[in-house]
């Protein structure tokens, strides 16, 4: 059976080749967003419950009413999903913060089954929508065809294969590109704010003041950060300069996580590795909650005893992590990275002079790659933040300090890579600054 694509949807009479796709009208926009919200909720829930479960009756009835309304209005419903945009009956749905988040999940689920959307050419029933939902259940292992699965056939709904519509989408997406960029910037701000709030809630829990917060709840936010950084790191370079001195720990943790991701992307780390590296940014400094505010906010020079207390922050962080969860492989790796990132990198090398004269490759050292990245990200964000005893350094000055006064603290390869990133993303006038770590 051939993969279904509605010929009317792409007829040359309605849409000449090369013409940009139009924005859907207000009513279709409203129903399109509602449909995405329902799909997101239903697909997530069917991972847990069978589609015949009574909990699906009400949302599936809502989905039926939306689909049948659009069919009654336009004669058919054709929903096409890509990684960035949604098209409903040849009009793109204007994405807002919630629909971007929902689309990301739905498109991944669709693409995993080689699906790019579906067409409905006559009214549907709740029973058929249950068969549609079965496509995304955890129990389904078979290949999905135009009419769904072998065990639960579709009648009014026809599934469209991703590979078949990909070429058609390539020409259509240009019309929605500006809209996507604007909304992704907004979404970047939302993910950033959520991440800051998560760190705040987690540290309050560790202090014994708030509701229980599991660290793994931050994984989804981190995955969003990874995806957004991979698509446009510039969004986050700008966002990461927005911070509150009073809430320094929360902002610093998220900023460090984002910088870890950006450096990791340049190093070619996998998504899983980027997620692990970002989680280190989230948690690396939480031990500060065990340090007196009078020490952390002191405007004068710290005494030797106070310096010793500050140096214990990684130790306090490790103790908090061990207290909050059982020891496993992931926790062990995090503990090792946190214990290493504050060590001057040169001290780990047998021949540091040679390594720093030839920074074109990663030096052999027992210090892990995550710790090396974290060291750079942590110091950069600390330098470019307002602190009680000094104003924030500019990007230029912070990079100069790292390259000239703190050289031996960092892996020379990672530091060189970081400087290149700053030249590209945040400080073009660094091109005229002679920064060298040799």
Image (cartoon, helix red, strand yellow):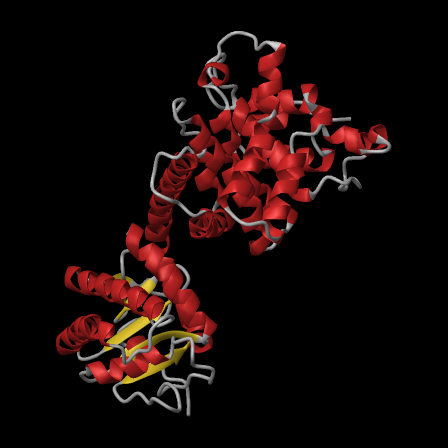
- Residue sitting at x 39%, y 41%: 198
116 horizontally vs 313: left or right: left
Residue 420 seen:
no
408 horizontally vs 421: left or right: right
Residue 422 image point, x, y percent: 57, 33
Image quarter of residue 344? top right
Count of picture labels: 0
- Residue sitting at x 26%, y 74%: 14
Image quarter of residue 74? bottom left
The C terminus lies in quadrant: top right
Query: Is 387 rendered above or below residue 175?
Result: above
Residue 361 image point, x, y percent: 77, 42
Query: Is 278 rendered above or below residue 36?
Result: above
Q: Nearer the viewer, residue 110 or 81?
A: 110
71 horizontally vs 251: left or right: left
Query: Is 79 rendered above or below residue 179?
Result: below
Query: Is 163 rendered above or below residue 433?
Result: below
- Residue sitting at x 39%, y 87%: 149
| Residue located farthest toward the top when viewing the structure as drawn | 300
Residue 305 image point, x, y percent: 61, 13
The N terminus lies in quadrant: bottom left
Residue 343 seen:
yes
Residue 49 image point, x, y percent: 33, 73
179 horizontally vs 112: left or right: left
């Amino acid at each position: 059976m051939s993969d279904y694509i509605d010929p009317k949807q792409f007829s040359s009479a309605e849409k000449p080749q090369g013409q940009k796709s139009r924005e859907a009208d207000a009513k279709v926009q409203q129903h399109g967003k509602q449909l995405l919200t329902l799909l997101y909720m239903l697909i997530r829930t069917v991972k847990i419950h069978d589609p015949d479960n009574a909990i699906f009756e009400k949302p599936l009835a809502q989905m039926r009413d939306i689909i049948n309304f659009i069919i009654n209005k336009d004669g058919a419903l054709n929903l096409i999903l890509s990684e960035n945009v949604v098209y409903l009956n040849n009009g793109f749905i204007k994405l807002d913060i919630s629909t971007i988040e929902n689309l990301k999940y739905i498109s991944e689920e669709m693409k995993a089954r080689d699906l790019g959307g579906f067409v409905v050419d006559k009214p549907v029933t709740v029973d058929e929508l249950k068969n549609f939902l079965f496509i995304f259940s955890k129990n389904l292992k078979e290949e999905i065809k135009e009419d769904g699965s072998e065990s639960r056939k579709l009648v009014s709904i026809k599934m469209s294969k991703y590979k078949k519509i990909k070429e058609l989408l390539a020409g259509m997406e240009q019309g929605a590109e500006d809209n996507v960029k604007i909304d992704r910037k907004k979404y970047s701000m939302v993910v950033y704010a959520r991440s800051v709030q998560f760190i705040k809630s987690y540290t309050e829990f560790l202090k014994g003041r708030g509701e229980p917060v599991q660290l793994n709840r931050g994984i989804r936010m981190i995955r969003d950060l990874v995806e957004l950084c991979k698509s446009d790191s510039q969004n986050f370079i700008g966002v990461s300069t927005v911070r509150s001195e009073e809430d320094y720990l929360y902002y610093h943790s998220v900023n460090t996580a984002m910088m870890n991701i950006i450096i990791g992307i340049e190093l070619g780390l996998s998504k899983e590795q980027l997620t692990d590296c970002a989680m280190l940014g989230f948690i690396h400094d939480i031990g500060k909650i065990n340090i007196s505010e009078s020490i952390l906010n002191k405007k004068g020079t710290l005494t030797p005893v106070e310096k010793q207390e500050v140096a214990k922050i990684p130790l306090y962080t490790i103790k908090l992590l061990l207290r909050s969860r059982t020891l496993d492989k992931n926790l062990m790796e995090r503990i090792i990275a946190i214990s290493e990132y504050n060590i001057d990198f040169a001290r780990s090398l047998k021949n540091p002079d040679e390594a720093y004269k030839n920074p074109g490759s990663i030096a052999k050292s027992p210090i892990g790659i995550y710790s090396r990245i974290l060291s750079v990200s942590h110091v950069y964000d600390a330098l470019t933040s307002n602190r009680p005893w000094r104003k924030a350094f500019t990007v230029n000055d912070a990079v100069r300090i790292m390259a000239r006064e703190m050289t031996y603290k960092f892996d020379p390869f990672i530091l060189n890579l970081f400087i290149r990133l700053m030249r590209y993303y945040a400080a073009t006038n660094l091109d005229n600054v002679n920064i060298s770590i040799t």
